Structures are given as structure tokens and as C-alpha cells.
Amino acid sequence: MGENWAEGRIALVTGATSGFGEAMARRILAAGGQVIATGRRVDRLEALVRDVATDRLLARELDVRAQTSIDALLSGLPAAFADIDILYNNAGLALGLGKAHQADLSDWETMIETNVTGLVRVTRAVLPGMVARNRGDVINLSSVAASYPYPGGNVYGGTKAFVRQFSLNLRADLLGTRVRVTSIEPGMAETEFSVVRFKGDEGAAGNVYKGVHAMSADDVALVCESVLKLPAHINVNTLEIMPVQQAFAPFAVDRG
Ligand code: NDP
Ligand code: 8X3
């Protein structure tokens, strides 16, 4: 598959206003594909439209937490963008790093509404078309937090474990179709993720990546592109990636 691997393909990218989503949108456009770039920050979408300046990009406001927003997006798509065959299910966030007994309940609810309910709703809306056309790729953004617990990861990790298991269960249901599903599970990647987690505290966010050659948004998009470019009979179920400078902690023991 050559440089124009995405030609003739239509991708819906959630969370395309920054980070992994924006990088993936740019990669798909560079490879000749069409992209429906979505997010809540319309100014960012407008900037992307100005920057790439191609009619293969359609930008639309979307809040994945609201079914009405998803319905309005999909029912309002022009025919040339209607047959979505790549779903980049990426919109998501972590809020806070507090211990479970101290964390803000509304932060927990927002993470569940976005990372779980939002992702499920978008998937449920897009999947029937993929099955009817018997083609499609669903790339779900999970995380290493799905598999490895860490202090303060509580609900965030739980949402990403859901994404991983939901992806595997989609595979089970889609057997007999040519629709592929992959759970992408990155570790440290420097995006706006930590600024969001620490609620705008750039100093705290910067400390997360200090001294580390973290992955970039485009590194993650590169890996996702490699998954999409694989021959159509190969399905990558789960794919975990980390910077070389990240590994695992030993078990914690309370000897008190
Ligand atoms: P960013 O904060 O840079 O991007 C997050 C994107 O999600 C933004 O475009 C944001 O757009 C969008 N988003 C958030 N809430 C909503 C919502 N309610 N409706 C629609 N869009 C929404 O972070 P990343 O690019 O790093 O994160 C992308 C995904 O990857 C997330 O699911 C994250 O959990 C996951 N991930 C990140 C890792 C990292 O280290 N960076 C590692 C592993 C996984 P807007 O605010 O405009 O709506
Ligand atoms: C983002 C990576 O380690 O902050 O999913 O949970 S981590």
C-alpha cells in the first residue's frame, strides 16, 4: 500500500482539535483520504480547515457526551462524507490524579460520560453502516492505564479498561464481517492530555514529561496508520506502545 493508502476512504475522527486526533486527521488527509474532524472547540476546527485547505476535510462541532450532538452530526453529513469507513474513536480525557476517597465525583462522571458513554454512542451510530457495506476500521483509543493500575488512575484507568474490553467484544460480534477493530494502548505521549488532567496547570503538566523523550501525537498517529495500512485480512486486536524511557513499577507494599 503506497503513500495514498487512504484514497477513497472516509474517516470520522473524534477529538480532532488537538493531540492524537488532530495528528491522525492530518495523516489521513496527507494519504489522500477524506476526514470529518470533530470536537467541541470550533476555533480549533476552523484553524485546521484554514491550515490544510482541502475539500477532503469537513469540520463539525461534536460533543460526544450528547446523543443529540451525535445524531445531528451524522444526519447532517453531505452524501460525499456519509459512508464512514474509518472511525477514530479518540475523544477522551483524564481529570485529576486524586485518590479515590478524595477525588471529585463530577470529574469521575465526566470521564465516564466522555470515555465510555460517548465512545459507545458514536460506535453504535457508525457501526451499522460499516456492517451494511461490509468494510471499516474502528480504532479505539484506550491506554496503558487499561492494564496497569497507578495511584490516582482510578476511574480513568477503569474507563480505558472498558474501551479495551469493548473493542475485543466488538471483534466477537463482528466476526463474519470485514470490519476490523483495534484497541490502541499508548503510554506517555505529550499532548494537551496533562494540561487537561491538571486543569490548565501548565507547570504540573510539564513535569510529567520532564527529562523524558515522550511519544508525540504524530508518533501515535504513525502507529495507527501502520495498523490501518495492514492487509485487509489482518486484525490487530490490541496494541500497547510506550516511550523507551517508560516501563513498569514494582508492586507497592505497605509495611506500616
Ligand atoms: P488531548 O487533550 O490533546 O486531546 C483530547 C481530544 O478529545 C481533544 O480534541 C478534545 O476536543 C476531545 N474531547 C474531549 N472531550 C470531548 C467531548 N466531550 N466531545 C468531543 N471531543 C472531546 O489528548 P490526547 O490527544 O493525548 O488524547 C486523545 C485520547 O488518547 C484520549 O482518549 C486519551 O485518554 C487517550 N490517551 C492519551 C495518552 C497520552 O499520554 N496523551 C495516552 C493514552 C491514551 P475538545 O476539547 O475540542 O472537545
Ligand atoms: C494516558 C497515559 O499513563 O497517564 O492514558 O494513564 S497515563
Image (cartoon, rainbow, N blue to C red):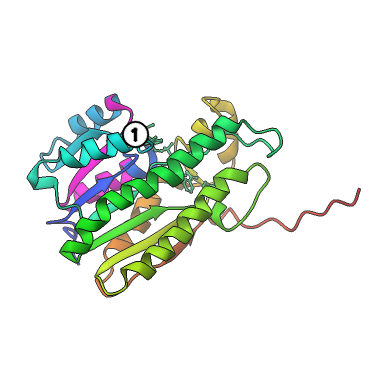
Q: Amino acid at mark 1?
A: Asp
Q: Is residue 214 above or below residue 173?
A: above
User: Is the residue at mark 1 in contact range of ligand 1, meaning its CB lies under 8 Å from it?
Assistant: yes
- Residues rendered magenta in the picture: 22-42
Q: Is residue 133 above or below residue 222?
A: below
Q: Which residue is mark 1?
A: 63
Nearer-the-camera pick, 210 or 93:
93
Q: Quadrant of residue 14?
A: top left
Q: Name, please, the residue furthest toward the left.
A: 79
Q: Is residue 30 magenta?
A: yes
Q: Position of residue 175 (x, y in %)?
A: 32, 73
Q: Position of residue 244 (x, y in %)?
A: 54, 57
What residue is at 38 percent from the left and 47 percent from the top?
119
Q: Quadrant of residue 166?
A: bottom left
Looking at the image, residue 146 sits to the left or right of residue 5; the answer is: right
Q: Is residue 64 magenta?
A: no
Q: Position of residue 193 (x, y in %)?
A: 48, 37
Nearer-the-camera pick, 202 or 113:
113
Task: Identify the image quadrant of the N terminus.
Answer: bottom left
What residue is at 38 percent from the left and 49 percent from the top?
120
Badge 1: few (under 14), some or many (20 or more) residues near its Cα, within 10 Å?
some
What residue is at 59 percent from the left and 42 percent from the top?
211
Exactly how many numbered labels are in the figure?
1
Is any atom of residue 160 visible in this view?
yes
Q: Circle 1 sits in a helix, a strand or a loop, which is it?
A: loop
Q: Position of residue 33 (x, y in %)?
A: 17, 51
